[in-house]
Image (cartoon, rainbow, N blue to C red):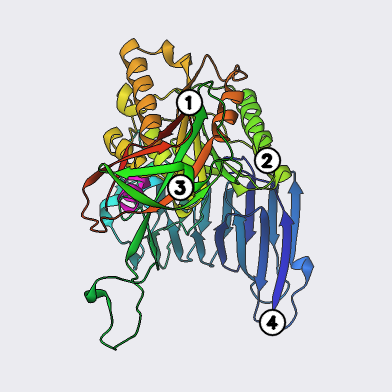
Amino acid sequence: MRLMVGVAVAATVCAAASLSVDNEAGSIEVIVTATTQLTVEGRSAEPLVAAQDIDVVRNGDDVRLQVRPRQSPLDLIIRLPLGFSLEASTVDGAISVQGMVHLARLETDTGAILLNIPLRGTRLTLDADVPPPDFITPDKRLLRASNLDLAGGRTLWRLRDRLPENSITYGDYRIKSRAPRQVEITAFEPPEGWPLRFHWDAALELERLSRPATLPINSEPAAAPSDRDDSPGELVFRSDVRMVNLTMAVSDRDGNPATMLSAAHFHVFEGGVEQRVANIQAGDAAFNLVVLLDMSGSAAPDLRHMRTAARRFVDMARPGDRVAIYALTQGMFQVVSPLSDDREALLAAVRNLPAIAGASPLYDIITLAYAQELHQRPDERNALIVISDGLDNQITGQEAPSSVRFRDLKRAAEEMHAIIYPVFLLSGRRFKKSFFERAQERMADLALASGGRMFPADDISDLDPVFPLIEADLRSVYSLGYYPDNQDFDGSWRAVEVSVDEPDVTVRARPGYYAN
């Protein structure tokens, strides 16, 4: 028999909201979800389960569940919003947690302990009076088991993580048990669209981004005999003709957007040879605008001004445009809001920005920001705005530097289907001069590689001069696709130049691409 209890909550990834569960006889299974709805499902072998069997006490976003079944044990399945802390206790029931819990305090007397958690980013201490007869983990190099001698001749079996002291972590687990019948700890793999990621995931994402950055297109009839079927007279279409997409800003001599241009106005040269323009999206076409907020300790931004900046970019959107808000916080990548044209939902998300804290693996977070949604939209107009002082920990030599080297990120930017606009906060000048200068140079190089521009700003509190400049540049952006004559994608670099048949008009685009 089932019993469902639903509790609407509004926790953010770094919220202090909590769930406390006391279930003496039954098991507790917790599944972390990227939603704001906390649900509790009770299962029992008895035909009748009353709502009174679960006592729900709520204080704001802090929820306490006390289970006192009047008949047989009641097993709980809890879907817990990401961002909650968790306390769970039972006597003989198993405790299972799947996902990312910010803070967990778990206790079971003899029940199994089953954890599917991000091992590389989780602190863990498990103390048991008796070692479990069944201990399972995919990589014991990440965990250390030992027997401790206590006063009075007692011993304690302790399982701990092996993470270095300065590691970036999200979860902190403290677990107590007398004689657990099983301990199983496996590595959590975030599902697609998961809003929180560790910065070291960027290295794998960059490898994925280095795969073909062009779209397979079923195109024109093949001309070569080898492209035809053996059946006489049957026309066959090639499936391997590929298109290269370019995003570029086009403006007049005064820096104003050059609008009303068609494909006929554009000429694309690859390796000095003119190519055939297949399609173009004009400056007034819908835009995907991703705003990445550097909320790390190095940037030392003011949360109120960060909210103001994010709201201004939401207000900048026109009908049909979509905006996403991402953040670098606690050394991790967080989706505050995915791409959306729902202005009210975006503004609500901005009100729940995460805390300002942590290291600055900026290059990793930029990589993850592009890979999150824009990479899947190569034939659309995309822009990535990065509000930061540019000080990756690779520059400062502090803990948790990016796993992605800047030169690799810059190369990837040359292939990205997005223009990058760094809003470079000059407040970074308080750091060592050589650090500041290198950060500024790298942000300018990143913008240039993508066809974008860097916009210096004195401070996060004074972005008013920057907003109209970015808005004008966004409205000058065109997306253009062409079929390279050379369809041998051998990984080599191909220089690309774009010109426009209009007087006093300039084009700013990435200088080429790698033919992967």
Q: Amino acid at mark 2?
A: Arg
Tell me: residue 298, above or below residue 56: above
Q: Are marks 1 and 4 in contact (CB under 8 Å)?
A: no
Q: Amino acid at mark 4?
A: Glu
Contact (CB < 8 A) between labels 2 and 4?
no
Q: Which circle, 3 or 1, is nearer the viewer?
A: 1
Classed neighbour count for the residue bearing mark 2: other residues with Cα under 10 Å, few (<14), some (14–19), many (≥20): few
| Among the two numbered marks 3 and 1 on one chain, the one whose residue lies closer to the N terminus | 3
Q: From the viewer's perspective, is the residue at label 3 or at label 4 nearer?
A: 3
Residue under pointer 3: 480
Q: Nearer the viewer, residue 344 or 288?
A: 288
Label placed on residue 46:
4
Q: Which of the two labelled residues, at mark 2 and mark 3, occupies the earlier sequence position?
A: 2
Q: 363 or 156: which is nearer to us?
A: 363
Dot 3: what SS? strand
Residue 436 image position (x, y, % from top left)? 37, 16
The percent coordinates of residue 483 (x first, y second) are 36, 56
Circle 2 residue: 318
Amino acid, disc 1: Asp
What's the distance in space between the residues labelled 2 and 4, CA to CA? 57 Å
Distance between mark 3 and mark 4 Cα atoms = 65 Å
Q: Secondary structure at mark 4?
A: loop
Residue at x-position 59% and y-position 20%? 463
What residue is shown with label 1? 504
Query: Would residue 173 be seen by someone viewing this image from the given angle?
Result: no
Left or right, residue 280 beside residue 442: right
| Nearest to N terminus: mark 2 or mark 1 | 2
